Image (cartoon, helix red, strand yellow):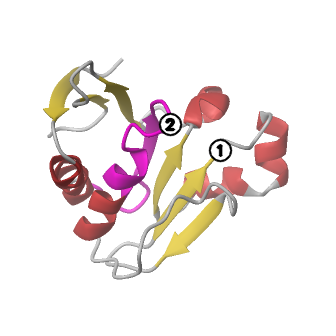
């Protein structure tokens, strides 16, 4: 298990900046697993990663499309597995091959496919604190 580091953000801009910091450390093939409750900042964090990758298109939560692709200095795949019921359904989408691509792949609600994520996955656990700040526990990357 990788060691982890914890960050606290008090604003959406700080969450965006933390995502950008992680995005700056990404290389082709990086996978980022984002976990946290609804409204915790997963998509804002993904927007920060996109900033680091020089992606100009607006980043939106792909809840209904499940997979969005973006062009940048490194192409980015943004998945939202909230509506996926099983690993089999994930595989039927053809999404598993995206885990082994030269893109940066961000996966929201990745709990469902945890057992098939590569060992080198960057894991981000987000929780909402009582004061509405966000706690980010990040492992698998040097920040």
Q: Distance between the Cα atoms at labels 2 and 1?
A: 12 Å
Residue 78, percent from left and from top: 52, 59
Against 111, is 22 above or below? Answer: below
Label 2 neighbour load within 10 Å: few <14, some 14-19, many 20+: few
Corner quadrant of residue 86: top right
Corner quadrant of residue 26: bottom left
Figure quadrant of the N terminus: top left
Q: How many marks?
A: 2
Name which residue lies at 32% across and 50% down.
45
Q: Circle 1 — which element? A: loop
Residue 125, percent from left and from top: 37, 28
Instruction: From the image, tell me which residue sits under label 2.
Output: 38
Front label number (2 vs 1) = 2
Residue 8, percent from left and from top: 16, 30
Name which residue lies at 21% across and 31% down.
133
Against 48, is 7 above or below? Answer: above
- Magenta span: 26-46
Name which residue lies at 36% across and 78% down.
72
* Sequence order check, earlier mark of 2 and 1: 2
Q: Are marks 2 and 1 in contact (CB under 8 Å)?
A: no
Q: Circle 2 — which element? A: loop
> In the image, which disc is placed on residue 64?
none
Residue 36, percent from left and from top: 45, 31
Instruction: From the image, tell me which residue sits under label 1.
Output: 81
Is residue 58 a member of the stretch shown in magenta? no
Figure quadrant of the C terminus: top left
Name which residue lies at 63% across and 62% down.
67
């Amino acid at each position: 298990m990788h060691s982890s580091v914890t960050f606290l953000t008090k604003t959406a801009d700080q969450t965006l900046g933390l995502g950008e910091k992680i995005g700056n450390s990404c290389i082709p093939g990086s996978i980022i697993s984002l976990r946290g409750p609804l409204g915790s900042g997963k998509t804002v964090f993904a927007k920060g990663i996109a900033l680091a990758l020089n992606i100009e298109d607006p980043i939106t939560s792909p809840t209904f499309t499940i997979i969005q692709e973006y062009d940048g200095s490194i192409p980015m795949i943004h998945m939202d597995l909230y509506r996926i019921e099983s690993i089999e359904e994930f595989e039927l989408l053809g999404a598993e091959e995206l885990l082994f691509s030269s893109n940066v792949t961000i996966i929201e609600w990745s709990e469902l496919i945890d057992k098939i994520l590569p060992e080198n996955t960057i894991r981000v656990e987000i929780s909402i604190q009582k004061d509405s700040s966000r706690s980010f526990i990040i492992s698998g990357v040097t920040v």
